[in-house]
Image: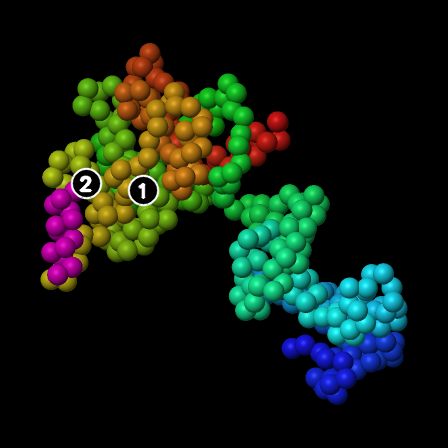
Amino acid sequence: MECRTGSGNSHSGLCVVDTGSYPHVWPVVRSILVAMLVKSGLTVITFGIKLPAGIFIPTLGVGACAGRVMGIAVQYLQAKHPNASLFQSCGGDIDCIVPGLYAMVGAAAALSGVTRTTVSLAVIMFELTDTLTYAVPVMLSVLVAKTVADALEPKGIYDLVIELNQLPYLDSKHEYLWGSLQINEVISRDVEVVRLDKKNTVSSLKAQLLSLTSSGADDSGFPIVRRDVNDDGFRLVGYIGSNELEHALALVTEDSEDEVHFHTAYSHPMASSSISSLQDVSQSVNIPLDPLDFTPYMDQAPLTLVNNSPMELVHQIFVKLGARYVVITDTDGLCKHPTTKLHLPLSNTRPDEGVIDKKTWLAFLSDLEEKS
């Protein structure tokens, strides 16, 4: 909607009837300012309390109100000083200043400053107006707004919210200086494991899960290990997350001392194919699977790294593969644990095996940034 001087249509009081008269200009400006303040306050409240009201459209509305007020102010100055050098290009045209254009430019500038979007935002504004007539002012306002916002605060609203809520997010564009840092400085060595050479019951797994969740590692899990055939240590054969284990235990209705089974390809070469075929058959004839068989809930191909791998490789796995954890083994592919080392000769213990989960890696990166 655009206002035309002398058209006689005020659009329910939203247009200034006489742009050169202060009593006609101020009520419209006051209404727009009140709407802008109310919209800004509601946006801050709803976004702060995580109400799904969005930040995109409200920011456009706030910026449009500010731009409209600026357009009306410039229009008022032109009406008061039509011969000023600033308005010589208008040639006396009273409709030379278009407040709607200022509103569109203000909306684009506000959204760019908040979300730090540039090219995509300019394209969105072109699609909203269905014209490329005002491409230059829109793109210029977006670039200026982003430059000013980056000078005040390098991070956008979404990055700040992620940092405030301590969400496990890794920026792929951020670079780190690793120096002489090694994996053993970030690895978690006191991780509970599930040993397949021992009897695992429902009660024992519940106790392990309770111990894990009480320590605050709700999104972690348990490496599943089996004693190596050469009796040199324990070899990793799988991994089960705490959420998956909790779900599997919730489906068990048997006695708490019943044994839980983990079938792995390491122990049974045909286990994977037999399990998948068993699942297909059970689904086709509606035969329920054994609730004590936790094989479908485990990851039989967890991501692993050797303990002498570079830190950059660990970082790339978390960033580019989106991994939740990485299991660190020795050069022989063995995964030992402090609770299992008691069964091994002291000379064979290696302290650089364990697990690195995403939260631990994020905490390590935060400390690295503070030190640097």
Check residue 181 in the rendering and tell me which mark sits there, or answer none.
none
Is 212 rendered above or below residue 102? above
Q: Earlier in the sequence, mark 1 or mark 2?
A: 1
Magenta includes 107? no
Q: Quadrant of residue 40?
A: bottom right
Q: Is residue 76 visible?
A: no
Magenta segment's dominant SS is helix
**Quadrant holding the N terminus:** bottom right
As drawn, which residue projects farthest toward the front?
91
- Give the residue at mark 1: 240
Taking the spot 16% from the left edge, 49% from the top edge, the residue there is 276
Q: Nearer the viewer, residue 196 or 9?
A: 9
Magenta includes 279? yes
Q: Residue flagged by tag 2: what amino acid is it? A: His
Residue 78 percent coordinates (x, y)? 83, 69
Q: Nearer the viewer, residue 369 or 274?
A: 369
Residue 166 percent coordinates (x, y)? 55, 45
In the image, taking residue 122 as reference, residue 269 lies left or right, namely left
**Quadrant holding the C terminus:** top right
Q: Residue flagged by tag 1: what amino acid is it? A: Ile
Check residue 263 in the rendering and tell me which mark sits there, or answer none.
2
Taking the spot 71% from the left edge, 45% from the top edge, the residue there is 152
In the image, taking residue 95 as reference, residue 127 lies left or right, namely left
Taking the spot 27% from the left edge, 20% from the top edge, the residue there is 332
For the record, the magenta segment spans 272-284
Q: Quadrant of residue 267?
A: top left
